[in-house]
Image (cartoon, rainbow, N blue to C red):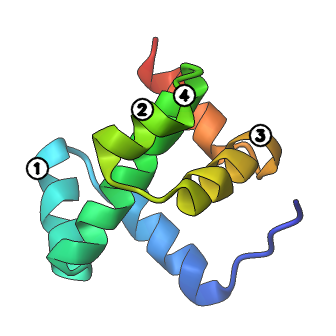
Amino acid sequence: MKYLPTEAENTLFKAILSLQSLNECQNFLRDLLTEAELKEFANRWKVAQLLAKKIDYKKIEKETGMSSTTIARISKWLIGGTGGYQLAIKKLNK
């Protein structure tokens, strides 16, 4: 899928890339996002990791509390998105 980020989005991405530690990243994202947004992003990331391990939707629903619709949407991006999920999963599994 073709994605063209805006200038504002690129500035955000550069800010994230400038962070040099887990603590810096935690602090930045906690200031940027509400607790609910942060939990939502963390759950989406967890779903992507579980899908990459071929875990069944029902088990993922039970473990994360995410709906099957959201899990399917994440699966769509995991398989046919821009490759971001796949790249991050691969890098973390090294």
Image depth: mark 2 or mark 3 in front = 2
Mark 4 near mark 2, Cβ–Cβ under 8 Å?
yes
Image depth: mark 3 or mark 1 in front = 3
In percent of the image, x 71 and y 52: which residue is there? 77
Residue designated by label 4: 56
Rendered view: 61 above or below 73: above
In this picture, residue 13 sits left or right of residue 46? right
In this picture, residue 34 sits left or right of residue 89? left
Image depth: mark 1 or mark 2 in front = 2
Q: Position of residue 40 (x, y in %)?
A: 33, 65
Amino acid beneath label 2? Lys
Residue designated by label 2: 59
Q: How many labels does the image show?
A: 4
Q: Which of 34 and 25 is in front in this view?
A: 34
Reading the chain from its start, which is encountered first: label 3 or label 1? 1
Residue designated by label 1: 23
Q: Nearer the viewer, residue 75 or 34?
A: 75
Residue designated by label 3: 79
Q: How much space separates mark 4 and mark 2, taking CA atoms?
A: 5 Å
Q: Quadrant of residue 41?
A: bottom left
Q: SS at mark 3?
A: helix
Q: SS at mark 1?
A: helix
Q: Position of residue 68 (x, y in %)?
A: 55, 54
Q: SS at mark 4?
A: loop
Q: What is the crowding at mark 3: few (fewer than 14 residues within 10 Å), some, or many (at least 20)?
A: some
In percent of the image, x 50 and y 24: which residue is there? 91
Amino acid beneath label 4? Asp
Q: What is the crowding at mark 2: few (fewer than 14 residues within 10 Å), some, or many (at least 20)?
A: few
Reading the chain from its start, which is encountered first: label 4 or label 3? 4
Mark 1 near mark 4, Cβ–Cβ under 8 Å?
no
Q: How much space separates mark 1 and mark 2, taking CA atoms?
A: 31 Å
Amino acid beneath label 1? Asn
